[in-house]
Amino acid sequence: MKRLQDAQQFEQAISSSTPVIVKFFTTWCPDCVRMDQFIDEVIAAYPQFTWYDINRDDVPDIAETYNVMGIPSLLVFQNGEKIAHLHSANAKTREQVEEFLQTIS
């Protein structure tokens, strides 16, 4: 997973014609740490997506624009448009994440 550092990198990443998943996280979030324990296996199982992460605290305006109210959240973009959003309440287990990904694959 590639780390996005700022709004410019974010905008460039989401403009891809292939689906892009951006994981919004923070360093102080226990659910984010839990997701980190299984996300590499999920990424390996879904190579059709390009995966990024971005620290929500570094880009509060982007988080607000895309309604990232809780973390971790997975947002799916294609051609600059958000096409799906897995909210934090439903992103606590590998099974929940994979169920979400199957709906957009």
Image (tube, grey):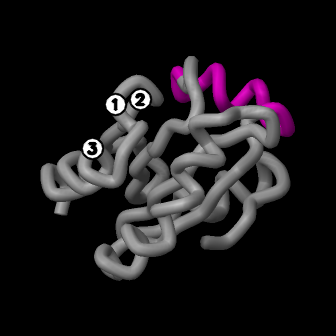
Query: What is the distance, in whole Å, between disc 1 and disc 2 at their CAs?
Result: 6 Å
* Tag 1 residue: 90
* Prevailing secondary structure of the magenta residues: helix
Q: Of helix, strand and loop, which one carries label 2? A: loop
Up-down relation of residue 53 to residue 43 (above or below) = above
In screen coordinates, is 8 left or right of 2?
right
Task: Give percent across and percent down for residue 19.
Answer: 37, 65
Determine contact: label 1, label 3, CB under 8 Å: yes
Q: Earlier in the sequence, mark 2 or mark 3?
A: 2
* Tag 2 residue: 87
Mark 1 is on which residue type? Answer: Asn
Mark 2 is on which residue type? Answer: His
Determine contact: label 1, label 2, CB under 8 Å: yes
Depth order, front residue of 67/93: 93
Residue 11 painted magenta: no
Query: Within 10 Å of the Cα at label 2, are there few (<14), some (14-19), or many (20+) other Cα atoms?
Result: some
Q: Which residue is located at x 76 percent, y 44 percent?
A: 55
* Tag 3 residue: 96
Q: Quadrant of the C terminus?
A: bottom left
Q: Quadrant of the N terminus?
A: bottom right
Q: Which residue is located at x 67 percent, y 41 percent?
A: 25
